[in-house]
Amino acid sequence: MKQNQLRRIEKLYDRRIAPHQIVTPEFARSMTELSHETRRQIGALIDRKGYIEYVVVGDARRIELPDLKRTRVAADRFRGLRCVHTHLRGEHLTQDDLTDLALLRLDLMVALDVDERTGLPGMVRAAHLLPTTAAELDANEAAAPYAFLEPQIPAQMDVDFLALINSLEEEMARNRRTTRRAEARDRTILVGVTKGSLAEAEESMAELHELATSAGVIVLIRLFRDVRP
């Protein structure tokens, strides 16, 4: 890359995004113009105060984000960083993008379309993890569901970023408290002994199951023992 381009990339660190905004039109334009000139994807990791923590230059197809997994994140929190990066081919968020979103527990993954002719920003595409996902990732769950924001051009983006993230984390915290309460409940195995018919035994077991459930006990399994001679 040319020295002028390198200096402009370094100056991205001097920018600041308003905390409630995902990205500003001015910052988006700086990124897409540089991406258009260099024919490389350019990304920025932005904290919740709007400061630029990392700037990353990739190739034409993807960027390689720094290893953030060494810093642990609470199960009911995201990482506090969002990734805003350019896409040269107008593609939607890729599987690599969504994998980074999930594995790094980012606040948001954002792709800026680069106009092939002018280098100006086109659509902004963004995705976040669903509230249950962060806790499930800690439990090594394979599935990682996402929600996608409506694509918009930068000047028309009206999503309050901080309000969105706060609401998602509040929901994660509620889900985690519910999970802890469920884990703290007593568990039991119901064993029924019968000398009569199977139908009578099942009816009796159903009543016992209902009593246990109403007492807040989780029934793990129901067993019958037939003691008829």
Image (spheres, rainbow, N blue to C red):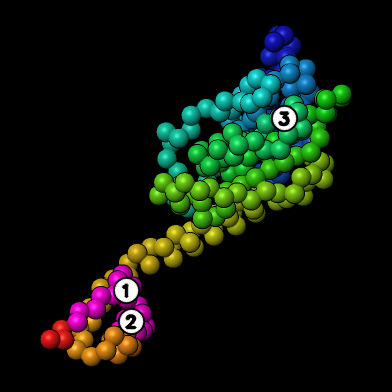
Q: Amino acid at mark 2?
A: His
Drawn side of residue 179 relative to residue 191, left or right: right
User: Which residue is nearer to you in this view: 192 or 107?
Assistant: 192
Name which of mark 3 and mark 1 comes first in the sequence. Answer: 3
The image position of residue 59, as x and y in percent, is 65, 20
The residues bearing labels 2 and 3 have C-alpha atoms spaced at a distance of: 57 Å
In this picture, is 21 found above or below 12? below
Between tags 2 and 3, which lies in front?
Answer: 2
In this picture, is 110 found above or below 227? above
Q: Which residue was labeled with disc 1? A: 219
Q: Amino acid at mark 3?
A: His
Q: Which residues are magenta?
A: 204-226
Please identify the residue farthest to the right as the structure is shown. 117
- For image coordinates 47% across by 46% down, the residue present is 142
- For image coordinates 72% across by 41% down, the residue present is 125
Drawn side of residue 102 relative to residue 213, left or right: right
Drawn side of residue 114 relative to residue 189, left or right: right
- Residue 225 on the magenta span: yes
The residues bearing labels 3 and 1 have C-alpha atoms spaced at a distance of: 52 Å
Q: Tag 1, which secondary structure?
A: strand
Q: Which residue was labeled with disc 3? A: 87
In this picture, is 110 found above or below 141? above
The image position of residue 81, as x and y in percent, is 57, 39
Name which of mark 2 and mark 3 comes first in the sequence. Answer: 3
Q: Which residue was labeled with disc 2? A: 209
Residue 136: tell me if it is visible: yes
User: Which residue is nearer to you in this view: 127 or 209?
Assistant: 209
